[in-house]
Each structure stands twice: as structure tokens, then as C-alpha cells.
Amino acid sequence: MTWPAGVDPGTTIGGGTAVFRRPRPTALGYLGLPLVLLAVCAVLFLWVGQQELGSIERRVLTPARLSSAFVEHMALTILSTVFVILIAIPLGILLTRPAARAIVPPVIALANIGQAVPSIGILVLLALYWAIGFWPAIVALVIYSNLPVLRNTMVGLQQVDASTIEAGRGMGMTKAAALRKIEMPLAIPVILAGVRTALVINVGTAALATFVSAGGLGEIINAGITSSRPTITLVGSVLTACLALLIDHIGGIAEGRLSPKGL
Amino acid sequence: MSTTTSTAEPMIRLEGLTKVFPGQKKPAVESLDMDIPAGEIVVLVGPSGCGKTTTMRLINRLIEPTSGRIILEGEDVTDVNPDKLRRRIGYVIQQVGLFPHQTISDNIATVPKMLGWDSPRIKSRVDELLSMVGLEPATYRERYPKHLSGGQRQRAGVARALSADPPVMLMDEPFGAIDPITRDRLQNEFLRLQETIRKTIIFVTHDIDEAIKMGDRIAILREGSAIAQYDTPERILSAPTDDFVADFIGAGASLKRLNLSRVRDIALVDWPTAGTNSSRAEVLAALRASDKGAVLILDEQRRPVRWISGRDLGREDEPIAEAGHLPEAIIQPNATLADALNEMLKSRVGCAIVVDQSGAYQGTVDFATVSGEIQDMRRDARERSRAEAEGIHAEGSVNG
């Protein structure tokens, strides 16, 4: 005896638990923005080439110095975000377990303070009481951008339909298996959105790292400001903006690629 | 129908099962004893908050009992690893709970994968189950749950619960969130499926009509999951033990009772019949030989074609096959008496015609048959209850 295949009980396509869904981008979607940014940089390069440059400009705007600032900026952004991921996601998972309910408010309060204090303040405080340079800047960035990832991890896990988890547990999944195979995959889109936010915060805040001698494109901007050379400031600013847009774009692609299908 | 005298070991036995939730004084389930026989659908039904869902979750230990034992297939499973226990028990819930990020085939393969089946075996099992629940494997295997309608999702949920062929299934209002027409169809299909798979099923609902339809036995629960009556649907409807049960069944118990008897189980009433090529005189003779007011005309395959009354015979110009009126209210032997009654009310002649699969005339059901049947059922139930009460009484006096 079978359930007859011919008589489908209706063909309505339910929206179900679907989180809102972006269409999968095309090749143009992936490459469009990078090409525009490249064009902007090319125009900038040509324009600078036609300017009469003074000795200060010539000293600062060298390919070696620009590219090292660019790489430093990337390193600050990516490394700090990696640390944020390593800290905030496990912490978020921990805080959503029923046993941890009591410690949620203080931890969230702490994370809130981290984000509420102005980033420059954290940087300066760390420089004053610890050290200057690359690592203090990384620590400051991590403190500053922890909250979005932590909060999104928690929200992402909490919004997973309780009945879906119950179904899994009811079939004999262990708690760990339910977390790994149900909760995490279903929370991933929200968590990734948090990571992307952290990336964008970090790429912007890393421009301030120059004040604790941590390098980055902020150094170029600052050099332009302190020496009253608007061309230098412009180059540093445009490069920072292009990097920020590029990183956000890559974050968006990763979000789409890493989110599970079927949502 | 199920036998109450079965001495076989129950598939599930609950002994003094109790659950007190922390911070609550009253137990949600209080000292419940219950035997669930193998191969039957036992429906737990009761008002909301009576503890029926808690009781069901105690069985697969999604909720750990405060005290009492759970015996599955003769084995005490109260203290075994709950995750391993649950892999032996199918579980279907109202919200279905399909994993939205997995294809239907991956969803169904959940338990087999945990049990370490190899992939060819899993694949063939998934296809087998999909066809069993009426979802064409080639079409639905790689779809995601969001591409399925509510009814299709519930079918996939049933397939998933059956995946490792567990002897026991727990179903918590499985058809609760589905529109009434689809629900009715899914219920019928599930009952047909159950005829072949013969699982031991614990089915929770708050809907007494669904309980009557689905259950081989029904346990009507009151607060604290106390059993008010645990019996076959027939006897619950015919002989409710107390006012609580009677109130819960609600009005129209006799009408509900009619859903449980099928036309094939009762004696049919004969009507005068005649062939399409009979003469008027023959039809008239048949009519006069009976106490009925009309003759049923049958074609060569004995399929009903016309009703002809005495007055219709007066019109000489019409051939027999066109006289009178078309027969309405035609039912098959597997129709319930409720269906028969419903058809009968539409019929001008006041009876429902019973035909077999090929459409050939078998007999008819009329009001007298149905009301006689209701009285028989009541009397049977009363007698059985009395006999049982006396039995218990006798036993008690021996022990005392």
C-alpha cells in the first residue's frame, strides 16, 4: 500500500522558515565593484602623475610606502576580524546554551561597553597603559568589533526554530550533533552578517591605528594632514575607501557562498 | 478490531510514570500505568494541559521522568542512553521540523546516517520511503523543504520517522497544522500505510474525532495524565465510564459511532430488482411481491440504472431503461455507516444502494438498518462493561 503519488495535497509553495534570500550573484555581480574600484584607483594614479609634486609628496607617495601601508591596513583588518571570529562565535554559542543563562547579561554589558567607548579612546588607553604598535592596535580593534559578531551569533542561534531542533533531538541526535548539524548551519547567515559588519568596522577603525604607530593607510592620510599636503590626504583617503568597499564586497560574496542552500 | 484479551507482551509498558517539573507542585504526569500493545495505534487524547504531550515525550525521554519505569519490548529503557533510545523510536511532530538546509533525501537519511548505514543502502531506503508516502523519488529527492506544500512536508516527516524501520512511532498532533481536506486525506493514507507497516504508534491529539478515526485504542486523559478511560473507540463512544469522558466526547456520540462501522459489516436489505429488458408486467410483479415502493433496474452487469416506482410504470410510452429516475446514493462496502446515512438523506427512495468495486448491485442500507445497528452497539458495549465489572468484582472477592 502506498500513498498515491498522483494526488498531491495541493501545490502551494510555502515560504516556511525562509530567511530573506538574495539571488545568487552573476559573474558581473562578483567583478563589477572591483572593476569600478580599479578604475577609480587608475584615475587617481593618472591625476597624481600630472600634478607637480613637491619633495614631501614624492617621499610619501612612493609605490613601496603606499603598498606597505595598504598591506598593513589589510593585515590589521583581517587579523583583528579573525580574532573576533575566534572569540565571539564560541562565546556566542556558549551563551546560548541553557546552562549559561545567568552569565548572559554581564557578558553582553561588557561587549556593549567595548563598542560604546569611542575606538580612538580604546586605542589611546591601550597605548598609554600597555604599549604602542601593531598588537595593541589589534587588541583595540578586537574589543571594538566583538559585539556585532557576538550578538549576531546569539540571535542567529536563538532564531532557529525550536521545533526543528526538537525533531533532531527526538530522532536521537546528541546535543553536540544538533548544534553542529542543525543550529549552526541555520544560524550561519546571521553570523556571517555580523562578521561582515565587524570587517567593515575594522577596516574603518584601522585608519586610526596610525596614532599608536601601528601603520596602515591612516598613516598616509595623517602625513598629508600634518604636512598640509591635500594630494597625500586624498590618495590615502581614496585608497582607504576603496579597500573598505572591496572588503565589504568580499564579505558579501562569502556570506552568499557560505550560507547553506534551501534557506 | 483489536482484541482486549491479547496476552502477548505489550510493546511499551509504562509503570508508575511520574513527571514533576521543577518549581511546580502538581505533577504534570502522575503515576501513569499503561500498556501499549504491539502493532496498534494508541491515541492519547484530552483537554489541553492534561499532560498528553508530556507523557509522549517521557516515552522517548525528551523529558526525563521523575520516577517510574519505561519498558520497551520487554527491556527497561528508563536508564539507557537517551540518544540511542530515540534512534529506535520514530518521532513526528505537528511542525514536522524538517531541516530547511537539507534536501528531502538528506532529511530522511538522518537516522540511518547516525546508525552508520552505507550509502547505497541509505539511498535505496530513501527512495523506498518516498514512494511509500507518495512522493515521487526522482522529483522530490533533491528538493528542499521550502519547495514542498504543508501536506507534502508532513509526508516527508512521516518518511523520516520511518527511515530506520523503528518498531514504535510517536506522533504529536501530526496532522494538526494542515487544512481539513488535506488532513482527511493524509489520515486515510496513513491508516492504509499502517495496515502494511503495523507499527506501534502513540498518537497525541486534542481532537476526539481524529482520535476515533485513527485509534485502535483511545486513552482519554484528564489533568495529570490520569487515564479516564482506555478502551477501543467503539466502547468509549457506546459506554463512556463517567461524565468526564461523556463530556469530552461531546454531543453526537451515536453519530460519531457510525464512523466506526462499515457497510460491509452489516446485513444489507434486499430491494426488488429487474433487468433493463424486463417487461412492464415483470417490473410490476416484482413491485407487488415486495413491501417497497420502487423497483431498482439493473443493467447486464447488474449495475443500478433506474429507480422505478408504481406511478412511473403508468407511463406506457417510456422504455424501462428510461422510466423513473436515476439512482442516487450509491456507496461501496467500505463506506462507513455515517457515509451511508449521509447518502440516504439525499435519496428520494430513502435508502443507499451498495455496489461492489465493479459497480454491481449488492443490496441496500436503510434507516432501520442503521438505527438497529446503533442499538446493537449500545447493548453490546453495556453488556461487555457489565461482564467486565463482574469479572473484576469476582477477582476482587477471590483475592479478599
Image (cartoon, coloured by chain):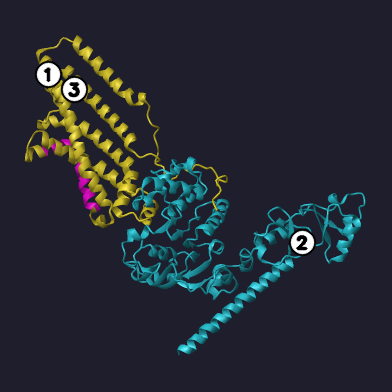
Question: Which of the labelled discs sits on residue A86, or is there none?
Answer: none
SS type, badge 3: helix
The residue labelled by disc 1 is A60
- Quadrant of the frame with the N terminus of chain B: bottom right
Q: Which chain is yellow?
A: A
User: Label 3 amino acid?
Assistant: Gly
Check disc 2 and give the amino acid type. Gly
Query: Mark 1 or mark 3, which has the lower sequence index?
Result: 1
Q: How many other residues sit within 10 Å of disc 3, few (<14), some (14-19) or many (≥20)? A: many
Q: Residue at x 35, y 53 (%)?
A: B115
How far apart are the two marked residues, 3 and 2, measured between alpha carbons?
95 Å
Q: Quadrant of the C terminus of chain B?
A: bottom left
Q: Which residue is mark 2?
A: B350
Q: Is residue A29 magenta?
A: no
Residue A173: quadrant of the picture: bottom left
Q: Which numbered mark, 3 or 2, is in the foreground of this view?
A: 2
Specify start and end residues of the magenta stretch as a single range.
A104-125
Residue A75 x, y percent position in the rendering = 17, 31
Residues flagged by tags 2 and 1 on a common chain:
no
Q: Residue at x 61, y 77 (%)?
A: B382
As helix, strand or loop, the secondary structure at mark 1 comes to: helix
**Tag shown at residue A236:** 3
- Return the x and y of residue B176 as percentages of the image width and height: 50, 56
In this structure image, what is the colour of chain B? cyan
**Marked residue chain, label 1:** A
